[in-house]
Amino acid sequence: MQPLTVINSTAISLPEPNIDTDIIYPARFLTDTRKIGLGEYAFYDRCANDPNFPIHRRIKQEILITGENFGSGSSREQAPWSLADLGLRVLIAPSFGDIFYGNCFRNGLLPIRLPSSVINELHQFAKKQVVFEINLIDCEIKLNVENRSVQFEVPSDGRESLLNGWNETTRILENYTNDIIAFEQKQRSDQPWLWK
């Protein structure tokens, strides 16, 4: 994964609440398990049925501002994979589905929870094509108008993974390599038949 430190981008405004993982990534595409290229299926039915839907196959924005309960429903990991493949790096909403929220961090997406009143204000800035600066180092959103800024909080382990570009495996290796080596050495000594 690419490290995520600072993102400068306009944002897509999608104020609809309760967008579940089946809307994000329809179940009929679950047989496609590749991680790269799934962006073509993101919001597939919405794109097919609404020519004015704000998200299509090729987007230039890296930020999506959306409604409450985004990513609720089944735990399909293809939902965050498809959003990341579209080029999104940051999702901002009042709330997220719990499993989806965790999957975002594991797949290079920064999900930011903010109060609905702040989200409503950010939707207005997004519609005006204001550039957002998302700074994960300082946990701050800055707008290039009105000297407006908003602080946000994210779990420290998710923040650390995004800042360093770690997936779950690289995170474990970075934090526990010495423990793993010590365990293997002890096991080789205590149970050598396992290492033959």
Image (cartoon, rainbow, N blue to C red):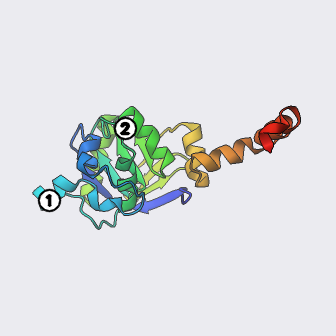
Q: Is residue 93 visible?
A: yes
Q: Quadrant of residue 15?
A: top left
Q: Residue placed at 31% from the left, 42% from the top?
A: 119
Q: Name the amino acid, label 1.
A: Ala
Q: Position of residue 46 (x, y in %)?
A: 17, 53
Question: Image quadrant of residue 128?
Answer: bottom left
Q: Residue at x 42, y 57 (%)?
A: 35
How much space separates mark 2 and mark 1, taking CA atoms? Answer: 24 Å
Viewport quadrant of the C terminus: top right
The residue closer to the viewer here, 16 or 102, is 102
Q: Which residue is mark 2?
A: 75
According to the picture, the residue beneath numbered tag 1 turns out to be 48
Image coordinates of residue 80 in percent, x first then y, are: 39, 49
Mark 2 vs 1: CB contact within 8 A: no
Report whether residue 151 is seen.
Answer: no
First of labels 2, 1 by sequence position: 1
Task: Select label 2 or label 1 by which is in front.
Answer: 2
Horizontally, is 99 left or right of 17 in the view? right
**Where residue 112 sits: x, y (%)?**
42, 42
> Does residue 98 appear left or right of residue 21 in this picture?
right
Image coordinates for residue 109, horizontal then vertical, percent: 45, 50
**Splitting the image into 4 quarters, where does residue 54 fall?**
bottom left
- At x 34%, y 48%, the residue is 79
Q: Which structural element holds mark 1?
A: helix
